[in-house]
Amino acid sequence: MSTRFVCFGELLLRLGAPGRELLLQSPHLDVHVGGAEANVAVALAHFGHVVALVSSVPENALGKAALGEMRRHGVDTTGITRKPGRMGLYFIETGAAQRPSDVLYDRADSAFARVLPESYDWPYLLAGAQVLHVSGVTPAVGANAASAAIAAVKAARAAGLDVVFDGNFRSKLWQAWDGDASAILHEIFACADLVFADHRDIAIALNRDFSAVRHDDIAQVATDAAFAAFPQLKRIAATQRRQHSVDHHELSATLFTRDGVIETPGYSMTPIVDRVGGGDAFAAGMLHGLYSGMSDADSLNFGLAAACLKHSVPGDFLRLETTDVAAFLGEQRFDIRR
Amino acid sequence: MSTRFVCFGELLLRLGAPGRELLLQSPHLDVHVGGAEANVAVALAHFGHVVALVSSVPENALGKAALGEMRRHGVDTTGITRKPGRMGLYFIETGAAQRPSDVLYDRADSAFARVLPESYDWPYLLAGAQVLHVSGVTPAVGANAASAAIAAVKAARAAGLDVVFDGNFRSKLWQAWDGDASAILHEIFACADLVFADHRDIAIALNRDFSAVRHDDIAQVATDAAFAAFPQLKRIAATQRRQHSVDHHELSATLFTRDGVIETPGYSMTPIVDRVGGGDAFAAGMLHGLYSGMSDADSLNFGLAAACLKHSVPGDFLRLETTDVAAFLGEQRFDIRR
Amino acid sequence: MSTRFVCFGELLLRLGAPGRELLLQSPHLDVHVGGAEANVAVALAHFGHVVALVSSVPENALGKAALGEMRRHGVDTTGITRKPGRMGLYFIETGAAQRPSDVLYDRADSAFARVLPESYDWPYLLAGAQVLHVSGVTPAVGANAASAAIAAVKAARAAGLDVVFDGNFRSKLWQAWDGDASAILHEIFACADLVFADHRDIAIALNRDFSAVRHDDIAQVATDAAFAAFPQLKRIAATQRRQHSVDHHELSATLFTRDGVIETPGYSMTPIVDRVGGGDAFAAGMLHGLYSGMSDADSLNFGLAAACLKHSVPGDFLRLETTDVAAFLGEQRFDIRR
Amino acid sequence: MSTRFVCFGELLLRLGAPGRELLLQSPHLDVHVGGAEANVAVALAHFGHVVALVSSVPENALGKAALGEMRRHGVDTTGITRKPGRMGLYFIETGAAQRPSDVLYDRADSAFARVLPESYDWPYLLAGAQVLHVSGVTPAVGANAASAAIAAVKAARAAGLDVVFDGNFRSKLWQAWDGDASAILHEIFACADLVFADHRDIAIALNRDFSAVRHDDIAQVATDAAFAAFPQLKRIAATQRRQHSVDHHELSATLFTRDGVIETPGYSMTPIVDRVGGGDAFAAGMLHGLYSGMSDADSLNFGLAAACLKHSVPGDFLRLETTDVAAFLGEQRFDIRR
Amino acid sequence: MSTRFVCFGELLLRLGAPGRELLLQSPHLDVHVGGAEANVAVALAHFGHVVALVSSVPENALGKAALGEMRRHGVDTTGITRKPGRMGLYFIETGAAQRPSDVLYDRADSAFARVLPESYDWPYLLAGAQVLHVSGVTPAVGANAASAAIAAVKAARAAGLDVVFDGNFRSKLWQAWDGDASAILHEIFACADLVFADHRDIAIALNRDFSAVRHDDIAQVATDAAFAAFPQLKRIAATQRRQHSVDHHELSATLFTRDGVIETPGYSMTPIVDRVGGGDAFAAGMLHGLYSGMSDADSLNFGLAAACLKHSVPGDFLRLETTDVAAFLGEQRFDIRR
Amino acid sequence: MSTRFVCFGELLLRLGAPGRELLLQSPHLDVHVGGAEANVAVALAHFGHVVALVSSVPENALGKAALGEMRRHGVDTTGITRKPGRMGLYFIETGAAQRPSDVLYDRADSAFARVLPESYDWPYLLAGAQVLHVSGVTPAVGANAASAAIAAVKAARAAGLDVVFDGNFRSKLWQAWDGDASAILHEIFACADLVFADHRDIAIALNRDFSAVRHDDIAQVATDAAFAAFPQLKRIAATQRRQHSVDHHELSATLFTRDGVIETPGYSMTPIVDRVGGGDAFAAGMLHGLYSGMSDADSLNFGLAAACLKHSVPGDFLRLETTDVAAFLGEQRFDIRR
């Protein structure tokens, strides 16, 4: 039984140096399509849900290719318009051991960023859906996108959809256009049923400073403050990442509800094939759990398992099925399946 | 001083997704030639033995290429016929961390499977050889191949060759043609001097159930039963694999003789470059040891070292020389040799 | 203003040697998705039409990938089922100069071929469409597919759709299951409004022999016979290919109607990047013309231009837009567009 | 005996689809560094001259790589600054036969375009040089670059350098910032000793319309007008390109002086490996000839030969030596040199 | 009915820039195994003959790989020894249009060149064979190889084998060790039944100068002189190559016997995929014809067809079968075979 | 504030099997430029220093490419001559887990090795520099290079430069020409201010045997002996490498001065992307520290950090900047930088 999701955000092309090479060390780039909301959309589609992405791509070969890639993964693209402007890009080199991976954004002034907020017909775009998902990257893109994101979550709330917001705070993007992150995120938090956020995201949305709080208490204090400030908010989820090296992280997750907190044990992830999209896979996995009738604890575990598996798949997308996640949560067999 | 071996089994093409990609994530496949018996044959040829493979490939470019690949590694291919039919294929995607590798077989109705058992002239094919090697994949391929395998081991035994059988039980293959694995494997075990098998293989060959036996005793109980049932049988060898993740296994080995049991310590294998063919390399290594005059214990160690090294070589074949295995068993230096 | 097309046929994976290499000369294969009807469907989708493909793919990673590739190009895949069985494959090596390209089919017993004809619900599958397209490859696949193809064209005719049939005679496929091509093609021709066929296709469908006819007259004689035998048939189109070398062909086209014949001049195509799918692009181009309100002559020219351009695009699909074909028919500028 | 050249213009990254694929048909891009003036600089450096490029690249890995590539070819990069901003990009897919190659520019708002004209210290940058080379791409980039280009040619003229201007008119770039091409190019022509230009470039620089002139006379009429308007101008050179297909062009060249006109025969170029940079190679070749003491006619031939050879070299750069060009002009042997 | 051939010469590794790139333009090299005599041996093996190569390779991974490659193609390698020393290499960049391909030899002081002539046991190496083939590259390698080549042809003649010599004159190799080409080639010609040679080769072997002879007569004059000087010589064959561009050659062939001359028409070869080994394929094709019972004229045509087809196959080897050559000589169909 | 360094040594091409393949397992090689002194030069250039390499490359495409690669990284190449001879090569296959990486040298008789010592004009080549760096590979190349190395360090000392010598003892190279390593290294040590050396290097330079010394004391004893024997010597540095597997080493470093010893903790390096050049990066890092005004301890740490990071970068060169090394020494964050 599938749920109908709408995700709203920008599609990006990721241009990556092959293997562990530095950028342009050899004259080749590998290309992936990505974007926080697109990543969630693709993962949910592979999990069997009906998912539409609302976005805009340029009217050129790059935009056409990105749009085709979404269709390939079964995402409904009728809400993606083709507009004048450029394709948002990012360049990446994948590190190793103690050399961190590096991202170089080249997404300013994209076709998506130029779309006027009034050009989105939200009642039409949300018709028939149960859930709207937006991440903090969307409002950070610029004034147009921020207004559109606020309009989207308000329209969704008004139409009775659940609203899911994934913090994904990117200070560089906000600084580039001098956006008032606190005010904007506050408006979005005020519409959300579920947020993926840690104390830093909450601090911004509440314009508060938790730095004086004891480290062990900070998550609970921030969560309490968020629940107090946003009465409609039901759940706050987050992952915790411990990094031993570029190729070896450990991931656990926490879910706060008004009834208390659920915590998972940590999974050791090594080698990490592709770290990009790990948080988006967590969101998609948890959404699958919650909207498939799993308990909060099972949803959290499913989300963490999806996040963990994402680190083993090249590209931004988790393109695995629920049976793959279930196998991970089950026997944990690591030999060839044949 | 080399020994003359004959191996009997099917050649397969392995079509693999590049690196850690999912199948057809990008539109490329890397091709390797393989097959349990071919893997043993190639390893033994690199160890300096005279090895012939008895097999059949289709009369087309794929069959020609597979046959050429065997010659490249020094295997005698005069016993490989070219017949109508298709090439057996398998597709593979290599997992990572907690995502298991996946094999997709597409080998039904191959040229090899179609060959009638009476078309093999075993006295001619075995002439001059000391050892016949067959694995459990061969009889599992179908009724023709099963009859041929039984004929082969009987002819070998009649002609005074040693017979080596490697269990390699693949339930999917047996189910595909509803073959009576127990009866067929019993006939083959009854001709073997050495089998590579664990308690599961033995249970099938004896049509017995060891599930009530205490876990710690099961190997000994099964082995005792096999030695009792098959008076000609001299040795039973097996590896034990502990899996920490897809990229990190630990391998040890055990050899049962009528005089007792020999056990090796475990080797930690990480990263695993290519896990396919690990068991075949163990068989080849142990055969090299036994037929080069090593003690049982040294042969077991040589086999385990060969198996371990196979995990570091791309493709199905162990294409290393005895000096490489000896270096592994010796100083264990891990810096560049220059 | 787009037309709704339904195409019915098998999806295949094409595994090709890189560049001009012989098969398995180096251990890599490049993968494309194709199939006569899929090729037509993709081209029509890029031309802006609404196209659904009716087909079946295996329930495995290969089938999933082929299906995703159709979606990527905007083809409606809701009529593609996932069934047990294998994926139809073909291997190709691309020749050069005087060395012809070679195809090696490995498509027997595919999931598509196994689908029982009664499992297709044609009224449902054709609902809302104006045109059904089938090629001669579909009935050649086997008894199931032949029955399904006949049922499809009858259902389409009954429902008032136009029926388009592309001859594509492949004797090897018919021989493999000893199918009665004449009888089956006769039934299909009897439902078609438009056929892509030359005198050889017509000879089979009519079970006649035109070999005694003078070479210059044979096309007209065969066409007359077809129009006489099939009163519902309105148009017969074909391309003529003159081959100077593997890399240099010349292509022209002819359209017979009951009013007479239209002929195009020939286009010289060199170098040929990928000859596969040339005929399918011709069909798609002509269908675009006819169903976009072009005259017969303009449709024929559009079809020929599409066919010609296909030879310059790697893979089985023509993935160009109508503006690209129009540019070809217009100024014919061959410098970089910048 | 080498001459000291200074070239002024933007460095670009070219991201190209592999082989004859469409953009993002497969997920790989091949990268080359280019730019009209950089192309001239690299060719002159390989011809043995001392060449400096004045430019700016972003302070990131892409800019660092582009700068390193210039150094690799022996171009003096001390006049290239590293500034905030993005790297100018262009995407390209290489056509075939009748499918034209397509370029997609993504160079707006680059680090180079942002550099203020007053930040160039021309007396310092030109010190010791004999020749300044600028192409029409530089002023087309934007108001900053246009002012800088004018300042550069004036400073060069004042300092006694020869000024060379290559028309390279790109209407899309001028339109993007609504630049007054006529006025700006007039100022630049007024400083040039040698221009690479045809009647279209001259029409813009003179703000005149030659469309009423008979086709056969138009080059001479335009040239006369230019010589009349710009008394310092000594030579006007241009190539003529006849296009049989994307892979087959024919190239000839013309040089107008105040003494008359010199024309070359045409070279047939097929196959064309890489058409980008052909005009820049012509400029570089002719500059080499003129500044190595060749006659005008020999310089023209050398330039045309360089242009022709460029079409056989992948990437934007002609990376051949004078001996390669001389061999082309000499025996024209087309067998392997061994 | 196959003939037993022995070929004597060096195995080389060819390290080539990808596609049409200049050497090290990008940091990759494609590797092929080759060598004039190895090329002949591989072609003859694919034509169904029994062929042994006498050679030496270094005792390292490169030598092992080259040896394995010969086995892969079915060449008997028991006469190839593994010796101290280095592997002979050559680097190649493939030109295009008017840019010639370039070879850079790095074969001095190879393991093969170091082998002492007395270490070859010719009676043993030639036992059972009917034909010995040597090319002019072998004696040009150095004093050791020259002595060995003379010993080989003398031993072959003494043992009743036919001796075939392919001129292949490489002046750079002779100059490197100041070898007396005239004296050495004279000795070899004096043992040959068939030589592949033009007037230049004959001039050297006879130490004569034909430069005063009229161009149209020179082949006949040189041939007459050779037949006069070498009474055992039966046939002199050669190809004529006309070069329109690097990618377009025309090839014809001539066979002189004591009875007269046979000439073929020319084949136009375009595009040329790989020109290396064209002459060796001609030799192999002609040998196949002569030793399969074809007439002189048919053998010449078969040789020319083999040479022509070689230009369409990547790498040094003609790896086609006699049916492929027959198809070329037959219908000349250039469409896909499916 | 940058220092001017001169490095003296040979440039090599490294031809490597792709990924973890054995040499020529597939027919491709990846190419890198390297050489102990070139590696130091490139790293220092990326650290912002002015570095010149004194060397010779052959007058061919390989030499031209190697020279261009040095320029690309900002190394001054005016001291690199182009001479007759061959390019020094080495082949490498990268191991995994317990299979060691293997290097196959093919550098004998290179253009560099042939250069006569008197052809170097050291006063000219060293003019303006503060530091000369030579490694033990240079004198090991042959008699010419050994004489040149001695002349270089003497000239540097005479001109007031600091002399840095990196032991890099390669017994195979010395044996190839029977060079008197002890005498030669003694002369070089006698000129050095700083040596990178362990007790084995010192034993050779002093022609002494420390094998009777207790293992824990041997470094101090050897160091004391070196300080006693070479009064001008100020510092002796070395790394210690503990190898857990081919992919997992641990590295620490020690610096002896006349005032005592400084030791670092060990860094665990896994996975190791490319181990080649690790020692050279240590030298470069330490030189950067010492000549940028860091303390001995900070310089040692910087050197060790540079060495460690080198293991994560493909190719022989450390192409990172001082900020990358500083980040390593600082927070040690292992997540993507975005």
Image (cartoon, coloured by chain):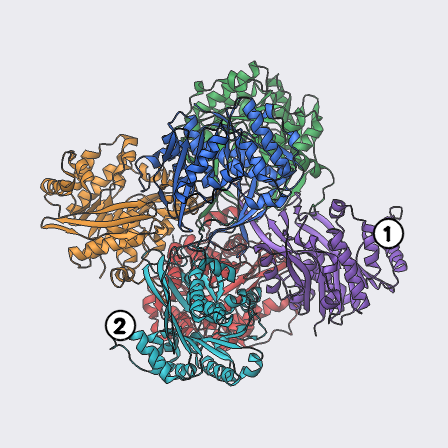
Chain colours: A purple, B red, C cyan, D blue, E orange, F green
Q: Which is closer to the viewer, label 2 or label 1?
A: 2
The chain holding disc 2 is: C
In the image, B192 versus C185, the foreground residue is C185
- Left/right of residue B193 with respect to residue E104 in the rendered view: right
Badge number at residue C247 = none
Are the residues under badges 2 and 1 in a single subunit? no
Q: Is residue F212 visible?
A: yes
Badge number at residue A218 = 1
Residue A228, percent from left and from top: 90, 59
Q: Is residue D6 above or below residue F91?
A: above
Residue E35, percent from left and from top: 32, 45
The amino acid type, in three-letter code, at marker 2 is His
The chain holding disc 1 is: A
Badge number at residue C215 = 2
- Left/right of residue D253 with respect to residue D127 in the rendered view: left
Q: Is residue A79 above or below residue F243?
A: below
Binning the other alpha carbons within 10 Å of mark 2 as few (below 14), some (14 to 19) or many (20 upward) gives few
In the image, C92 versus F319, the foreground residue is C92
The amino acid type, in three-letter code, at marker 1 is Ile
Please report the residue visible at 61 percent of the width from the left and 28 percent of the height from the top: F213
